[in-house]
Image (cartoon, helix red, strand yellow):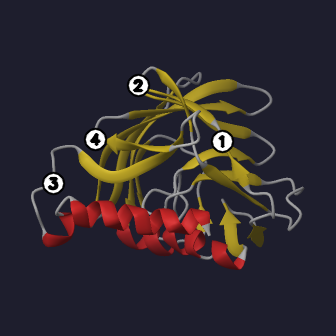
Amino acid sequence: MKKYLLLFFALIVMVSTGIAQGAQVAPGSLHMAMMIKNDDGSDGMYEIQRGDKLIYHINTGSAEYDFIVTINDSNEKGIDFNYEMTNANNTKGHVLISDKAKNEATRYMNFFRGGELNLTDASTVWLSYKNFTDMPERKTIMQIDNGSRETFYRPEKDEVYPIIKIKGADKKIDAFIINNAADGKGKKTMWINGISSNPLIVKMDLGWTVELKEIR
């Protein structure tokens, strides 16, 4: 299946560049790839770097503002990022998603009050490896914030190609949908970057929306 062949492709790239043999990794390289679909049908790749800013737009219905994620690191300790919001409070903070949470979490946090947040049993911004690798079975169990555990499904027509401005140029991202109804018509939807090493949530509709618009 296409989305899971991408993992194999990523591993081939790692081996060919010497990473599998423990070679020196280029400064800034985090192995957080975004798969790009070019207009001619070919595939490309963008590797998220330390210092990159992921600009999400949030619409709650009563307010709109940006949620800006600045990537610090992704390593054996987990995913480390700072964030700031252009809301009325100019909320700012720092998040560490532990390696255990990054790999095993099935709960997701979407509300930030500022300050330090160390996630050891929940993820945010990224789908966990556990939930991503459930996708060949077309369903997985997730808990959104403090809600009940529920099943999210990968519908039959799951491919989407959101356009994101990356370093000033519009790029079409190869992503897939999960939804809380098997037919894809439920009230909760996530769009996920289709690479297991970087299962970034690029769009989410939970009755309010958050959407990645740009990487600077």
Residues marked 1 and 2 touching at CB (< 8 Å): no
Between 112 and 68, the one nearer to me in the picture:
68
**Element type at marker 3?**
loop
Q: Residue 127 in the image: x percent, y percent?
A: 55, 60
Q: Residue 63 in the image: x percent, y percent?
A: 72, 25
Mark 4 or mark 2, whichever is nearer to me: 2
- Residue 161 is tagged as 1
Residue named by callout 2: 167
- Near mark 4 (Cα within 10 A), the count class, few <14, some 14-19 or many ≥20, is some
- Residue 25 is tagged as 3
Disc 1 versus disc 4: distance between alpha carbons?
25 Å
Residue at the farthest front position: 40
Q: Amino acid at mark 2?
A: Lys
Q: Residue 195 in the image: x percent, y percent?
A: 49, 59
Q: Is residue 12 left or right of residue 89?
A: left
Residues marked 1 and 4 touching at CB (< 8 Å): no
Quarter where residue 74 is shown: bottom left
Q: Earlier in the sequence, mark 1 or mark 2?
A: 1
Quadrant where the N terminus sits is: bottom right
Residues marked 3 and 4 touching at CB (< 8 Å): no
Q: Earlier in the sequence, mark 1 or mark 3?
A: 3
Q: Amino acid at mark 4?
A: Arg
Disc 3 versus disc 2: distance between alpha carbons?
22 Å
Q: Earlier in the sequence, mark 4 or mark 2?
A: 4
Disc 3 versus disc 4: distance between alpha carbons?
13 Å
**Element type at marker 4?**
loop
Q: Residue at image x 76%, y 40%?
A: 208
- Residue 50 is tagged as 4
Q: Residue at image x 78%, y 27%?
A: 62
Q: Is residue 79 visible?
A: yes
- Residue 56 is tagged as none
Q: Is residue 14 left or right of residue 151?
A: left
